[in-house]
Amino acid sequence: MSNSAMLLAQAGAEVAKVSTGEAISFWILAPLALGGALGMIFARNAVHSAMFLVLTMLSLGVMYMVQQAPFLGFVQIIVYTGAIMMLFLFVLMLVGRDSSDSVVEVLRGQRVWAAILGIGLAGLLVTGVAEALTSVRPVGLAEQNAGGANVANIGRSVFTDYLFPFELTSALLITAALGAMVLGYTDKSKRRTQRETADARFRGEHDRPSPLPGPGVYATANSVAVPALLPDGSIAPESVSAIIEATASRELATDIETVAGAIPGPDAHALKPAAAKEGDK
Amino acid sequence: MLALQPPPQAPIDAPQIEYSAILPVLILLGAACIGVLVEAFVSKASRWAAQVTLSLLAILGAGLAFVLYVTDSPERGLTTLYRTIAVDRPALFLWGTLLALGLGALLLIADRTVERGGAFVAQAGIRPGTVQDRAQMASGGMQTEVFPLTLFALSGMMIFCAANDLLTMFIALEVLSLPLYLMCGLARRRRLISQESAVKYFLLGAFASAFFLYGLALLYGYAGSVKLADIANAAAGSAASDTLLFGGFGLLVVGLMFKASVGPFHAWTPDVYQGSPTPITAFMAACTKVAAFGGILRVLTVGFESTSWEWRGVLWVVAVASMVIGAVLGLTQTDIKRMLAYSSIAHAGFLLVGALALRPEGLSGTLFYLLTYGFTTLAAFGAVSLVRDSNGEATHLSQWAGLAKRSPVLAWVFAFLLLAMAGIPLTSGFIGKFVVFSAGIQDGMAPLVVIALVASAVAAFFYLRVIVLMFFSDPAPDGPTVTVPGTFTTAAITLGVLVTLVLGLVPAFALDWAGTGTFAF
């Protein structure tokens, strides 16, 4: 487009004045929104991350209201902050807020480059948009909002100009619901009865027909880390959870030696040595 | 001053809707909703039959409505639903292509003879590798939700091609993408790689949608409207800064190119094509490409033709990058599905040559190329699904050695399809490349066409390598077997091969149809 046309257009356009109240609210809300967005990215805890996002969305909602879009502002707060972010928090709590991402960098230098390129793209967009919008004058805002007709006009355009995209979003919602069910639902109707499970145990589908033995209970200790003894005095290794055995295996080794009679006990009535049984094997 | 009582509003005029024009889309959307109800109310045993019948009837019904409308459609096309949908000749051509390709893909999806129970998992909610997973592997069922999801995706694609404003286009983009993300993760075999592909596609697709939306917002800021025609008018004489126009255009194009798996935005393609269930790969490779290029053609032609001097150089680079990446990386692949994925990236570059021509020959050439490529790739993936060993599909190239000795029919069919992709005369691929490249030369893009010819020569090398492998190698003793397909898969492959052959021998009728009109807006 020619330069003269540009000049003419700019001469005709009065650059809109920003009122003091709007400026104050902007300079309060904008740092909050920006801080919330940065906090969302850098927070280690997922719940903190979500709360920072709530802060950003609330600030944006108020900004929309300041810019004479009350409906959009309230929708932003009610739908995004109120409904969607709360759902987010529910999911985080259900999944477990301790579950954290792996911090291992798979590609070397990926983060550095991602940061450089991301900041570069953001800088490009911000300078471009800022340069383009500084001389823009709002058009048609007063007529659209005359006498509080903001909502009515949105309703009108939803049922006229944007009727089809509006209706089409229903397809999107149905797909999302269907997808959640496909990925989340497992058919439990064919659960085995107790009798079938018992039969299966004795048919050998499980490792052993009976449940695992409990840990030992003695006068000196009833910890889950103490193994139970079998009737012949030998240790039942299954009676201790695999995790515990791994951590306290040294203690268990001396216990085994004691019980096996390798270390002579002070008491003549100590447990019978299991050596004979070992020898039988 | 806020008045509590808003002023009385004039009543809304009921919109003028050309129901006969959009009936095919409405039939598909309605059938998809009924399919969801079938999931809810029909017993599990009879669901598959009900869904297949419903989906086939829907596509055939939509095809019938389409044919009835096409026979007396207005020459210049029309816009309906407050100008959000433009049913013009290019859109109708794309709709016909999509319906036919959708029918073929649906047949592949519905097949249960190649793999017992179909290519889809019985219950996606069960974690891979568990006892329950091994149990369901033996069971014969499948997630029949795939059928309504396919119909939703297909209707989204049809709307995407005909969307006359960017907002409708964005929602159509989501309607077509969301079911695809889901269906990618539903493979019966190799579930982890399938789920990985779904997550990759979803995350990268969400990024691409965000780019598209950002571009849309900037363009709205520029033109004050999301309608393509208004953006074109604003570009011709607006006082607003061009930064918004070209920033918005750039971001918008990133989103579109991602869906079409063009050039540097292709990173998802090989992984997703490899991991998805093969019928879904066929559906994606054929139909998504058609829909995405339909959208690209409309956006470039209707919205941005007047500013083509500014952006054409950038898209030249994108087209060259796409052709080079596709052709060169395709050479190094050892997996047949990944190889076809890189071939689709190279083809996207060739298609972009036609789309950049911005003249009637370019439009009709690209439409024709989409038609030919869609059917060829559909049949090729159908054929890939037949070569199997005990672990499912045998996709490693070394397993394809000497396939001609095991199954000459399949080897000849696959060789024919590969030759069509390479663009050998007497196949549709040759005519497609010819019309697209000649449109490029007419528009003064000779250097780009030369690069495209070199790239297609390089790409021909890896197609020929597979043919040589199939015909002139000795089969491995424990190699895969070729499953004899049932009616559905046979029908789909036959459809693809026949169209490839017919369009290679007598392309005139399709070329004429592709060139009958321009976009309405």
Image: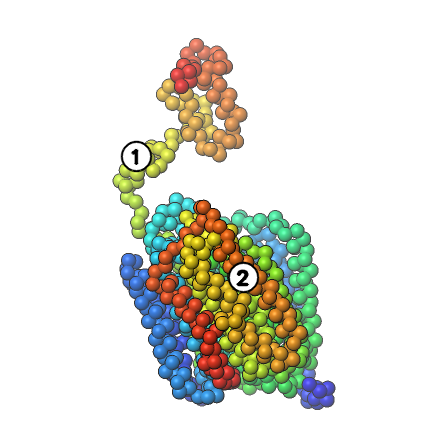
* Type of the residue with mark 1: Phe
Q: Is residue A251 visible?
A: yes
- Residue ID at (37%, 63%): B490
Residue A26 is left or right of residue B285, and the answer is right
Q: Residues within 10 Å of mark 1 (few under 14, many from 20)?
A: few
Residue B366 is left or right of residue A189, and the answer is right
Task: State the CA–CA distance, disc 2 to disc 1.
Answer: 57 Å
Q: Which one is in front in this view, the residue at disc 2 or the one at disc 1?
A: 2
The quarter of the picture where residue B32 lies is bottom left
The relative height of residue B231 versus residue B404 in the rendered view (above or below) is below
Q: Quadrant of the C terminus of chain A?
A: top left
- Residue ID at (47%, 80%): B508
The quarter of the picture where residue B152 lies is bottom left
The quarter of the picture where residue B20 lies is bottom left
Q: Quadrant of the N terminus of chain A?
A: bottom right
Q: Position of residue A22 (x, y in %)?
A: 64, 75
Q: Which mark is residue A202?
A: 1
- Which residue has dot 2 on it? B463
Q: Residues within 10 Å of mark 2 (few under 14, many from 20)?
A: many
The relative height of residue A53 versus residue A100 in the rendered view (above or below) is below
Q: Nearer the viewer, residue B24 or B408?
A: B408
Marks 2, 1 in one chain: no
* Type of the residue with mark 2: Tyr
Total numbered labels: 2
